[in-house]
Image (cartoon, grey):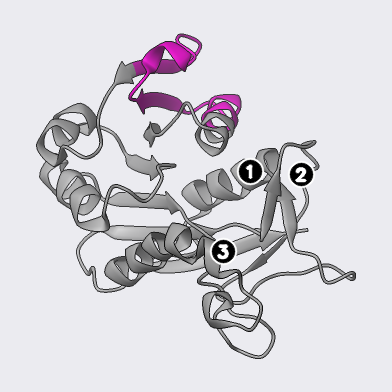
Amino acid sequence: MYVAVLGASGRAGSEITKELVARGHKVLAIARNPEKLPNGNGVTAKAGDASDADALAEQIKGVDAVISALHFDVPAATLLSAVKTAGVDRLLVTGGAASLKNSAGVMLYDSEGFPDAIKPVVKPAIDFLDDLRREDQVDWTFFSPAMNIFEGPRRGEFRLGKDELVTDENGESKISFADYAIAMVDELEQHNHSRSRFTAAY
């Protein structure tokens, strides 16, 4: 496929770009600072500001899908407007874990002990998912990571979930950026979570 990756210079975006190229996909890598992006070998790097919906729409015309690895200072309405204008059918979004539910069915954001200090940081991701859930034209997918996403090896194995946090036998929820990228590109190729959210962890 020909895939646009927004925020391709970040940790998640760069790993997703790497995984896409390794599987033979072509990547349009877009970031505010394209000098940090790889170029060649299946990747075309371009400078872009995703907060400008019209300009972004022009850049992404002709791609098969858009993967957003942006921070949530760009609202869902802006990205949805861009992909609709560009005529792109699929939008996959790297999300946050705070909107996942714990084993008691309570959203982590609302659970006892969730740090108040980070609530303002993670709330925009929750709002973004809420906005996507009201969208009925674009084929979207929201990928919530494990609670702890870290630089680590590419193991190639993890467990998937939907709306509930996935934890290991020690009660920890974690995954490496490399395996996170595998899960995202698997979703791009397999299309298992149309207009829904999923998660992955060891």
Q: Which residue carries the number 2 mark? A: 156
Circle nearer the N terminus (1, 3): 3
Q: Quadrant of residue 121?
A: bottom left
- Between label 2 and label 3, give the one nearer the viewer: 3
Q: Which residue carries the number 1 mark? A: 182
Q: Is mark 2 on a helix, strand or loop?
A: loop
Would you say 46 lies left or right of 181 here? left
**What residue is rendered at 42% in x and 52% in y?**
93
| Residue in the foreground of this view, choosing between 16 and 33 | 33
Circle nearer the N terminus (2, 3): 3
Would you say 8 lies left or right of 130 here? right
The residues tagged by marks 2 and 1 sit, at their Cα atoms, a distance apart of 7 Å
Residue range corresponding to the magenta coloring: 17-45
Which amino acid does the dot numbered 2 rest on? Answer: Gly
The residues tagged by marks 2 and 3 sit, at their Cα atoms, a distance apart of 21 Å
164 w.r.t. 189: above or below: below
Mark 3 Cα-neighbour bin, 10 Å: few <14, some 14–19, many ≥20: many
Quadrant of the snapshot with the C terminus? bottom right
- Measuring from the top left, give residue 39's x and y in whole percent: 45, 10
**What residue is rendered at 53% in x and 31% in y?**
20
Which amino acid does the dot numbered 1 rest on? Answer: Ile
Q: Which residue carries the number 3 mark? A: 97
- Measuring from the top left, give residue 53's x and y in whole percent: 15, 41
- Measuring from the top left, give residue 6's x and y in whole percent: 37, 35
